[in-house]
Amino acid sequence: MPKELLLQVTPEIAANESLLKDHLSKQIKVSVQEIQHVSILKRSIDARQKAIKINLKVIIYLKGEPFQETKIELPLYKDVSSAQEVIVVGAGPAGLFAALQLIELGLKPIVLERGKDVRGRRRDLKAINREHIVNEDSNYCFGEGGAGTYSDGKLYTRSKKRGDVTRILELLVAFGASEDILVEAHPHIGTNKLPKIIEDIRNKIIEFGGQVLFDTRVTDILVKNNEVEGIVTQTGDKILANKLILATGHSARDIFELLDKKKIFIEAKPFALGVRAEHSQELIDSIQYSCDYRGDYLPPAPYSIVKQVNGRGMYSFCMCPGGVIAPCATSPGEVVTNGWSPSKRDQATANSGIVIELKLEDFKPFAKFGALAGMEFQKSIEQKAWHLAGETQKVPAQRMIDFTQNKVSADIPKTSYVPGTTSVEMGQVFPGFLSQILREGFKEFGKSMRGYLTNEAILHAPESRTSSPVRIPRDPMTLEHLQIKGLYPCGEGAGYAGGIISAAIDGEKCALMIAEALK
């Protein structure tokens, strides 16, 4: 009978199949020749001690025990070209996985994406990086694959109670992702590999009768007697269907404004906001691994840190080992930062959002905007950053210790943020209470991670798109909007997900609820 084991080994043993088999043969007291196959089920790093260990969960097959390599395959999709149509607005993870689930259930998705296909987006990313030109429909947030495609593809989630995480990971593997994502404690695909996977998902949707329309921005939702009838695009075209999944992402401000204008119920939602901090990866490795040199068998070190400062949570967000900082504005006249890593995480710098949880009371100066108060608060900071940085996509920046001491940095070294930086006292970007919490928080971070608080670290502001500033309320049982029949608010933009996996799960759930309603 195959043996399942939990064990700790050195990084070198974990990385070498032959050494691992030698180690296991001694553990279970059989010869190496008797071991037919070893499957790694889970892998994580334990860096709590100076001698770093790798935690493994393995299953060992000895000679004579039945073993067969399992190939993860896609579901048996049906041809839905003549089936009942469901409109899906947004081709991020929520929209794409909703579309796949609809096909599996025998329904025809019509996916509308305001931006360009995954390859066409690259020209617009180059334009914002090199020429400081922001395309409002095609950028790091908008376009095929959504915000995750060109900002990393991190797949770890705390939302395991929300749905079947393994199913989403296995679908990604079936579409071309490495099987490592099924094993790693913090799975990650990488910005360089995600576009091909997204492209293959789109082609599968089309192959089985679905539609995917790019450069198609929704400008109106047709509603009669509190029931969805369809949508109108920016060209005036109408697409009619009485089921609509709204999966537009956390930055679709025009959709929030449209819903508010049409008196379709939405509400302000707290989110988190702060800066993106960049250190050398070598420094983060030395802190996390307690070493001078990381070696060949350990990945670039991440970090995760949480503190309570003045009654607020301050924490690292979307940490990118061996990554870069990217400009993520979605409109001219604003500056927004985010971070991403390639699959090998082989860049010289590490960055992370360092953000503070906001409360609804923080939006009081924008109370006249009602449910859009948090969005306007967010927008005001992004626009202020743009003005302070010379009305370009350069980013306000400051050395970390200088920031804690309210001192403008005399110089800013070149960072991974391609459009460039402008030396600014960061207190000018944020309201006073946020600046104070950040200053005190960085000092606390420095106590927990010796060496983290350094003037070699550069802060970039703002990191403001951590989650949606709006929630679109829905019935927890049917997932239908509380007011509009046939409208299914979905994913991050509706306030029901936080990241690729949870958004994909939510997309599938909405598709399942629609199929149930149509019965």
Image: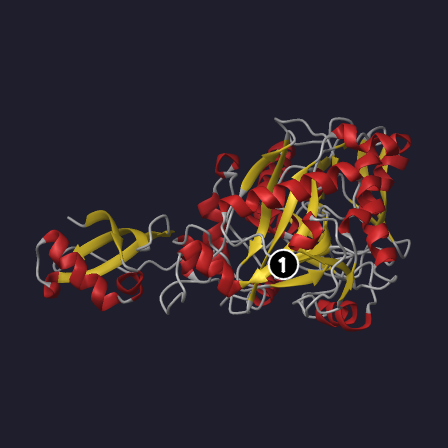
Q: From what the image shows, is residue 477 above or below residue 414?
A: above
* Number of numbered discs on residues: 1
Please state which of residues 40 and 473 is positioned toward the viewer in this rendering.
40
Please state which of residues 423 and 384 is positioned toward the viewer in this rendering.
423
Residue name at image x 83 percent, y 36 percent: 372
In the displayed structure image, the side of residue 188 where residue 243 appears, left or right: right
Say which quadrant the C terminus sits in: top right
Q: Secondary structure at mark 1?
A: loop
* Amino acid bearing label 1: Asn
Residue 140 location, x and y as percent?
Answer: 71, 60
Residue 185 location, x and y as percent?
Answer: 42, 50
Does residue 484 appear in this view? no
Tell me if mark 1 has few (under 14), some (14-19) or many (20+) residues whose alpha carbon lies within 10 angstroms of its own. some
Which residue is labeled 1 in the image?
455
Residue name at image x 55 percent, y 69 percent: 347
Residue name at image x 70 percent, y 51 percent: 403
